[in-house]
Amino acid sequence: MNPTGLQMSFSFVPLGLGFIRLVAALPPTLGMALGRLIGAFLFYTARERRLVCERNIAVCFPEFNQTDQYNLVKACFEQNGIGLTETAWSWHRPINFVNDKIRVSGRELLEQANIEGRGVLLLCPHYSMLDLIAPLMHAVAGRFVVSYRPNDNPIFDQAVCRGRARYAKLVDVRALRDIAKHLKQGEMVWFGPDQDMGPKGSVFAPFFGRPACTVTTPARLARLSGAVSIFLDLHRDDNGLYQVSFVPMPNDYPGKDEVENARLLNQRIEDALKKNPSQYMWMHKRFKTSPDLTRQTLYQS
């Protein structure tokens, strides 16, 4: 998992963390409204991130007219603002605060893996409620393992780790042997496979019809550990309930062809995002690397 919310400068981190604690103490309805307001504010002020979001939406949803694309970009910022509130809840509310707001399908996939004594590689995109995944998964399956990339700011990184460690063990996403060890021990490991990490250890596979630099790590981990690969389809519905769906990967995943593995994974992500496109972090440069290994001009103003 990568940190959600605002990237804060060194001097403003304590203030930002104090604000997150304050948001957690607000009544839920007020907290959601404040999160949406923060997202709307960033829509108008975070110009670089808005440009990235606009370009991603234009590429992935060309069937939308300009008005629909504009509205979706604005909704994305609002949903990611709500994600900040959900992060505050995850870090500071009682561990079981979300238990009565979860609706689960596909739980039998986890149960079958447990019967077989196999670990679960949980493949999960970067939804807007990213940090809320920790209490959600804890409620469904107990303590698990989160792979994440440490933040450059040590104060912020410490806060992130402290918040997530309430529900899970944390392991550096680059420590593949450690991740494989947890999987071999029959544990569930969260892994985010949907960001452009550059050409090393990646292949190009279609994502919404455009070649996207896609990491091969999930397939490698599954082969190395013998774990079951399960996709997590997640969204918040109009009633404020979190719909958690565990979706099996195809029987032939992972195969020997890494491009095909990446295609199957990207297709799962597409299927999930098409249902609730605003609840995703479209602010990331998903198409940063071009197939000719140069940086895309897509995000240039």
Image: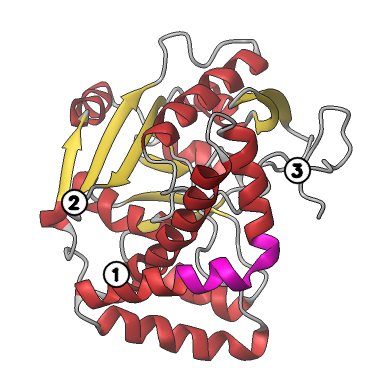
Left or right, 222 with reference to 45: left
Residue 42 in which image quadrant = bottom right
Cα separation, mark 1 vs mark 2, equals 13 Å
Picture disc at residue 32: 1
- Residue 11 image point, x, y percent: 64, 91
Q: For residue 42: magenta?
A: yes
Q: Disc count in the image?
A: 3
Amino acid type indicated by mark 2: Leu
- Residue holding disc 3: 288
Element marked by disc 2 = loop
Camera-side residue of 59 and 111: 59
Q: Main secondary structure of the magenta part?
A: helix
Lower position in the chain sequence, tag 1 or tag 2: 1
Q: Residue at x 62, y 77 (%)?
A: 154
> Which residue lies at the image location 43% right of the left edge and 66% below the top edge?
81
Question: Which of the labelled discs sits on residue 241, or is there none?
Answer: 2
Task: Estimate how packed mark 1 is, as few (under 14), some (14 to 19) or many (20 or more) residues with alpha carbons within 10 Å.
Answer: many
> Against 12, is 182 above or below?
above
Q: Specify start and end residues of the magenta stretch as a single range.
A: 39-49
What is the secondary structure assignment of the residue under circle 3? Answer: loop
